[in-house]
Amino acid sequence: MVLALALSGGLAPPTPALAQDRLQDAPIELSLLATRDAAGENCRRIDEIGAANLTPVSLHRTFEDDFDEHPLKHGLWLPHYSGGAAWPQAQYFGGPRSQLKRQTKYNGEQQIYVDPHYRGLALRALGLDPFRVRGGVLSIIASRTPPELQAALFDNPYISGILTTQASFSQKYGYFEIRSKIPVGTGVWPAFWLLANDGGWPPEIDVMEGRGQRPGDLVMTTHWRIPETQKIQSCGFDFELPDAAVAFHDYGVLWQQDRIIYFIDRRPVSDIKVPVGFDDPMYMIINLAMGSKWFGGVGIVDGETPQMVEFQIDRVSAYQLDPYQSDKTQGTMPIKASLMGENDGR
């Protein structure tokens, strides 16, 4: 979500064999077909790949939220950036009232992330809740800021929501997946992405970003830093899914020791050799930003922007590679997840 460089591509709608009801639930055990031929330094699309270059990968579930209850009820999620020792999290200072914990100014975002306890510059909590749960589906709702609250909310034209697991769950390697609809409209920027749990950036994995001005266009991108030059490198693709705004689909990423593979409806669509710097466990972020000064196909908030936008999420799940799993590309090694019971106070 912080940086992205996307290359054009297309994806045909899922075949009947991948009917949506087969993907609705998150099974305890999961097997995915992953690429096994040599992964390149640059990302590549996987349009047609022979069966000889695919191998099953076995995983077991380590995290699931199917949103039968409010996302803030049990401590799995925080409604703001948590902070950390390195950039960009180090900039999220100022305590719970800070605007910096609730907006990435660098992106040109025009929303502030709120929750029922957030008060901004007011003397008491404003009671703003951008999260709604109906029938097992979470909606993150972005809406115009009430005029009387503009000053207390740093004059941001929209209020919206973010959820992050940095304080509760992170994992090195494995499969991370969201089942959602991708909202559209001028200035609309939904995303599901991963950041390193140590607070550094990059690495970053953008599992799914929507370009609100381009219905059916979603982006999957990997970001990393070249140690010798400190330059940021990004590689990813746009995929076309015509019914993405009206139908639930599964968007996932499989992070292995040697490669990162992106999936739509559990079908591999692109991959890349794991770049330098992917050393720490990563945590999950879901957010609905409004406005971008540089991310193409989003645009800035204007008179054409909807008064209210819903980012609907049916489920978020994470899986770990089965211990000592071996294949020609992965090798043999035990993998551990990190599941923290309490906020570390950052």
Image (cartoon, grey):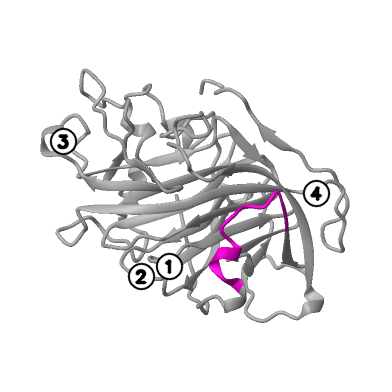
Region rendered in magenta: 18-30
User: Label 3: which residue?
Assistant: 150
> Could you give the CA–CA distance between mark 4 and mark 2, rounded to whole angstroms?
37 Å
Secondary structure under tag 1 reads: loop
Percent across and percent down for residue 245 are: 38, 65
Which residue is label 1 attached to?
A: 244
Q: Secondary structure at mark 4?
A: loop
Query: Of callouts 3 and 4, which one flags the residue occurring earlier in the amino acid sequence?
Result: 3
Q: Which residue is mark 2?
A: 215
Separation (CA) of disc 1 from disc 4: 31 Å
The residues bearing labels 2 and 3 have C-alpha atoms spaced at a distance of: 30 Å
Q: Position of residue 256 (x, y in %)?
A: 73, 54
Three-letter residue code for mark 4:
Asp
**Residue 317 percent across, percent down from the top left:** 59, 48
Residue 234 is at least partly visible in this image: no
Contact, mark 1 vs mark 4 (Cβ under 8 Å): no
Q: Nearer the viewer, residue 104 or 29?
A: 29
Q: Which residue is mark 4?
A: 322
Distance in Å between CA atoms under marks 3 and 4: 50 Å
10 Å neighbourhood of mark 3: few (<14), some, or many (≥20)?
A: some
Q: CA distance from mark 1 to mark 2?
A: 8 Å
Position of residue 306 relative to residue 96, above or below, is: below
The reply to whether residue 71 is in sight is: yes
Question: Is 105 left, or right, of 334 in this rendering?
Answer: left
Q: Amino acid type of disc 1? A: Ala
